[in-house]
Image: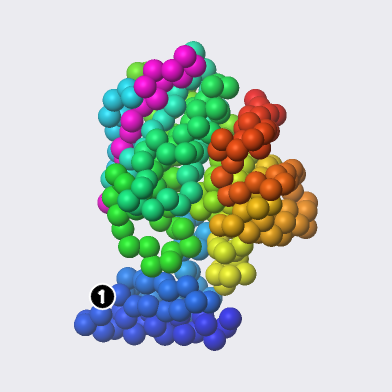
C-alpha cells in the first residue's frame, strides 16, 4: 500500500510539472483513476495525498453552489404532489422528481436512488418510482434524482470513480433542499432534515452507503440488492464508505436468486454490520431475483418492511 501511495504521489508531481499533460492516470487496485494536474501536490508528503474519490475528499467538497429549479408540478396524487426538478451538480444539469406530501408537515425526508439501467432504456419514472411513491404516501418528502449519465441528466466521464460523481449529485440535491427549508413558498418549506432516510437499489445502494457515511443526519438506510462489496474499502485501498462513523440503522433486503448482484454481497455486509455493532435487520427473499416488482408476495412484503422501518426510525 505504501508503494502504491508513493507511485500515486510521484504521478501527481510528474503531471504537475509537465505542461504537455492535462491529466494523469494511476491504477489503484485495478480501478482507473484520473486526476487533474495540480502544482500544489509537489509540496505534499505521502501521508497528505488524498484520493479525490475518498470519503475524506468528498467530506470537504462544497455543495449547493448552483441552483435547484422546480420546473413544474408533474402529477397530483391523493396523498402527495410530484414535481419535476432540475439542478446543478459539477457543471452538469441533473433531472429528477420530488414527491411532497399533502399537509402542513414538517415532513421527514427520504432519498430514493435507482439502480443501473442502460441509458437507452432509462426513464425518469423508472421502476423505483413505485417505491418512492409508497414511501411518500406515508408522509415523507421523497427526493428521486436521475443521477448523472441517466437521461435526461447530463453525461460525464466516470473513469471508475467509485461512484463519487453519483454521490456528489445526491449531496448537492440535499444541500439545495437545506437552503430552502423554512422559506415561505418553497416546496421544501416544511422539510425536516433532522430526520433523513435513504433507500438505494443495486448501484444506488452503494451510493447510499457513501452518502450515509458523509451525513450523520441520515438515521435510516435501506439497501435493496445493493452493491456493497465491489466498492468496499478493501477493494479501493481508501475509505469508500465507513460504517463505524455512520449513526444510521440499516435494513438490508436481497433475493436469493439474484443473478445480477450475488446475495453473498448482502450476507457479507450483514456480518460487517454485526462486527461494528450496528443496529440492523437483514431479510432474504427465497427464490426472488434482483428486482421484486410484480413477483408474488416478495414485493409488497418488501414495501411494508421499508415503510415500517422508516416509521420506526424517522418519526
For residue 29, above or below residue 143: below
Q: Is residue 310 left or right of residue 12?
A: right
- The percent position of residue 21, horizontal first and vertical second, equals 25, 80
Does 311 lie within the magenta span? no
Viewer-proximal residue, 123 or 251?
123
Q: Is residue 264 visible?
A: yes
Q: Residue at x 44, y 64 (%)?
A: 161
Q: Tell me the chief SS of the magenta region.
A: strand
Quickly name the residue at label 1. 22
Q: Is residue 302 visible?
A: no
- The percent position of residue 75, horizontal first and vertical second, equals 37, 22
Magenta residues? Answer: 75-92
Q: Is residue 23 left or right of residue 206?
A: left
Q: Dividing the picture into quarters, in which one does residue 216 lie?
A: top right
Figure quadrant of the C terminus? top right
Figure quadrant of the N terminus? bottom right
Q: Residue at x 54, y 22 (%)?
A: 137
- The percent position of residue 253, horizontal first and vertical second, equals 66, 45
Viewer-proximal residue, 289 or 198?
289
For residue 32, above or below residue 296: below
Amino acid at each position: 500500500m505504501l508503494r502504491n501511495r508513493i507511485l500515486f504521489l510521484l504521478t501527481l508531481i510528474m503531471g504537475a510539472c509537465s505542461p504537455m499533460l492535462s491529466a494523469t492516470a494511476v491504477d489503484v487496485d485495478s480501478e482507473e483513476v484520473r486526476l487533474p494536474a495540480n502544482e500544489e501536490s509537489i509540496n505534499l508528503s505521502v501521508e497528505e495525498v488524498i484520493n479525490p474519490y475518498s470519503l475524506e475528499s468528498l467530506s470537504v467538497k462544497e455543495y449547493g453552489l448552483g441552483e435547484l429549479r422546480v420546473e413544474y408540478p408533474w402529477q397530483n396524487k391523493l396523498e402527495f404532489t410530484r414535481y419535476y426538478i432540475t439542478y446543478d451538480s459539477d457543471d452538469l444539469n441533473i433531472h429528477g422528481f420530488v414527491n411532497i406530501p399533502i399537509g402542513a408537515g414538517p415532513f421527514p425526508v427520504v432519498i430514493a436512488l435507482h439502480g443501473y439501467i442502460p441509458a437507452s432504456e432509462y426513464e425518469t419514472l423508472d421502476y423505483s418510482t413505485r417505491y418512492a411513491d409508497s414511501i411518500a404516501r406515508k408522509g415523507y418528502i421523497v427526493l428521486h434524482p436521475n443521477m448523472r449519465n441517466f437521461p435526461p441528466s447530463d453525461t460525464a466521464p466516470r473513469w471508475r470513480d467509485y461512484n463519487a460523481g453519483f454521490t456528489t449529485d445526491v449531496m448537492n440535491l440535499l444541500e439545495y433542499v437545506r437552503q430552502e427549508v423554512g422559506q415561505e413558498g418553497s416546496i421544501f418549506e416544511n422539510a425536516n432534515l433532522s430526520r433523513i432516510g435513504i433507500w438505494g437499489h443495486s448501484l444506488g445502494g452503494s451510493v447510499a452507503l457513501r452518502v450515509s457515511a458523509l451525513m450523520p443526519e441520515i438515521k435510516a438506510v435501506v439497501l435493496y440488492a445493493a452493491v456493497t462489496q465491489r466498492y468496499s474499502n478493501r477493494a479501493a485501498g481508501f475509505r469508500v464508505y465507513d460504517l463505524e462513523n455512520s449513526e444510521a440503522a440499516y435494513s438490508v433486503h436481497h433475493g436469493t436468486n439474484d443473478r445480477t448482484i450475488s446475495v453473498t454481497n448482502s450476507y457479507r455486509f450483514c456480518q460487517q454490520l454485526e462486527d461494528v455493532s450496528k443496529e440492523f435487520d437483514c431479510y432474504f427473499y427465497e427464490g426472488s431475483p434482483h428486482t421484486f416488482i410484480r413477483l408474488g408476495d416478495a414485493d409488497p412484503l418488501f414495501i411494508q418492511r421499508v415503510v415500517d422501518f422508516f416509521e420506526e426510525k424517522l418519526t
